[in-house]
Image (cartoon, rainbow, N blue to C red):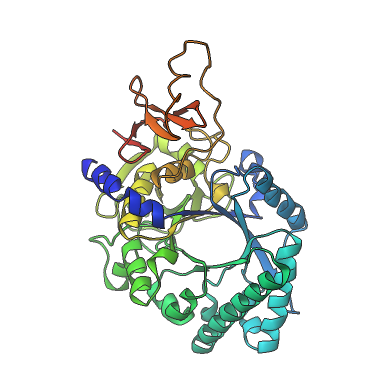
Amino acid sequence: MAKFLTALGILLALHMASSNKLVCHMTNWAQYRPGPGKFTSNNIDPFLCTHVIYSLATINTFNQITPIESNDEQQYTRLNNLKKFNPALKTLLSVGGTVNGMSPFISMVAKAENRAAFIKSALSFLRTHNFDGLNLAWEYPAHNGSPEQDRERFTLLVKELVAAFEKDAKDSRMTQLLLSANVGSIRTTIDRAYEVKLISGYLDFINLMTYDYHGHWEAATGHNSPMYSSSMDVGTHVNQNINSSVSYWLALGAPAEKLLLGFPSYGRTYRLSTGAAGLGAPTNGPADAGPYTRTSGFWAFYEVCNFLPSAQVEWIDEQKVPYATIGSSWVGYDDRRSFSSKVEWMTGMNLGGAHVWTLDMDDFSGSFCGAGSYPLINHLRMSMGFSPKPTTTPAPTTTKDPIAEFCLGRPDGLYTNPADKTTYFQCFMGNTYLHHCQPGLIYYDSCKCCNWS
């Protein structure tokens, strides 16, 4: 822990200059989850993330962007209205997915006229609905196309989109639209799908999908999003981890400042098939689906929270991530401790920031984990050094209250509360705001963040 705090403190200035994006995805299918699992644009905290990406739109047979859900346009409006509360918030629309098992990108990128139709549609659609940019969910398209041609055509699409966005900004005198992409992290996918150095020059940022390295499709337990390889890994599995994926993107020419590390707010589950329960234990498919996500093979973090009180929780030290078991159910997931480890590593690599999949799988309402709303993402935000959100109530302002008077004459910023290490002060325009760390954490002035004691 001392090593972590020292590294974080030393790198804080560099980190603040480079790791300045916290991009959060939301999904339009989360609205169909039952009860407290239901999530819409109304559940978004406008001060939590620097960017919010709305997933997902698709491409129709005329090569035009089109919504998927009947109420997408209403959700677009609610999402983009959040910028009235936080003008610094940026929103992007993600396009991709599959149509009858095929990526809609494949036929669209195949011809110049198809790409032109898509780009014209994208400009109109994004401006009409007040988005700040486009996110290309180009994740595994080469799996059902011609890899070499698809890779080159994707580069053409990215180049042509940027040229069109530049022209649109000049003609309209509006801020230029952003362009980002969700990209794979498995080396075979990277080789098949991307001309890394070329696309990196055009994209504003690149969301590395540093998760789903392992799951119930395998015959033994493995963590969803490990920092490093484990002693159990053999063959290609030694490269199925964050350190290997990011290193490979960098080696292929991606600038570190454009790469955003993926942070999953969910865990992958297995059904244990023997008495073994550790990493690499034999399995037979997924554990039961979660009661809210209702999809075999993964649980949202808020579903993991319900599982943990009765479970045996373990820490995989060589991979810096936890897992838990109860009976024959096994889940590898992320928590605040693993998020802190990843932020420390991300900072040391000078990456451009983080992206979270997804807002709707964190405990967004604070109803499940007993740690307030968005416990994972709030912890990620603080670990990255962002200032606290302007959502807390000012400290009491009684005439001689020393707390209320703390910030008089002090510069804006964060300060230690000498009387209570689990809290800290924010000074803003002479006002004193008292903030509380998440349970179990204390405030460190060295990193301007809450962390373990």
Examine the rendering and report whether any part of residue 342 can be seen. no
Q: Nearer the viewer, residue 89 or 303?
A: 89
Q: Is residue 192 visible?
A: yes
Q: Residue at x 36, y 56 (%)?
A: 223
Q: Position of residue 349 (x, y in %)?
A: 32, 60
Q: Residue furthest front?
A: 409
Drawn side of residue 143 relative to residue 92, left or right: left
- Specify the quadrant that holds the C terminus: top left
The residue depicted at 28 percent of the width and 73 percent of the height is 235
**Above or below — where is 443 with respect to 360?**
above
Residue 369 horizontal/vertical position (percent): 48, 35
Compared to 325, does 142 lie above or below?
below
Q: Where in the figure is residue 51, as x and y percent of width and height?
A: 56, 54
Q: Is residue 410 above or below residue 84?
A: above
| Camera-side residue of 157 and 173 | 173
Number of marks: 0
Residue in the image at 54% along x and 24% along y? 394
Q: Nearer the viewer, residue 242 or 424?
A: 424
Q: Quadrant of the N terminus?
A: top left
Give the image location of residue 90, x and y in percent.
60, 55
Q: Is residue 408 above or below residue 115?
A: above
